[in-house]
């Protein structure tokens, strides 16, 4: 599988490490009143979809960037690759 890195161009998937669902970017506020329930859901509950899915990948053997890859889990076709920092900023996260 080839991942088209937004900065470095096409790279073999063996350079990357899959880290899970891209919703991990949306870490809940640990100081909120419902923090325990939200963190339980954040850490342990995951969907296992067949079809289009947004995933978090780490470029371990390259520039060490985090990517959000939109991929069909059935066919492995990649439809988009974005830098995770850009996705997080678009969702209003500053850090």
Image: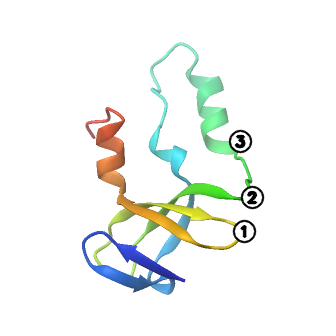
Residue position for label 2: 50
Q: Quadrant of residue 66?
A: bottom left
Residue at image location 70% in from the left, 46% down from the top: 46
Q: Earlier in the sequence, mark 3 or mark 1?
A: 3
Which is more toward the observer, 81 or 63?
Answer: 81
13 versus 57 height, above or below: below
Contact check, label 1 and label 2, Cβ < 8 Å: yes
- Residue at which label 3 appears: 45
* Residue 3 falls left or right of residue 82: right
Mark 3 burial class by Cα count in 10 Å: few <14, some 14-19, many 20+: few
- The correct choice, above or below, for 28 with respect to 5 in the image is above
Q: Residue at x 54, y 58 (%)?
A: 55
* Quadrant including the N terminus: bottom right
Badge 2 element: loop
Q: Residues within 10 Å of mark 2 (few under 14, many from 20)?
A: few
Sequence-wise, which precedes: disc 1 or disc 2?
2
Q: Secondary structure at mark 1?
A: loop
């Amino acid at each position: 599988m080839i991942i088209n890195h937004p900065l470095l161009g096409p790279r073999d998937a063996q350079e990357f490490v899959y880290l899970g669902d891209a919703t991990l970017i949306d870490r809940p506020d640990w100081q909120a009143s419902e923090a325990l329930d939200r963190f339980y859901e954040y850490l342990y509950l995951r969907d296992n979809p067949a079809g289009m899915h947004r995933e978090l990948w780490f470029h371990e053997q390259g520039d060490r960037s985090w990517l959000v890859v939109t991929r069909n889990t059935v066919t492995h076709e990649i439809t988009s690759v974005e830098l995770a920092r850009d996705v997080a900023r678009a969702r209003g996260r500053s850090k």
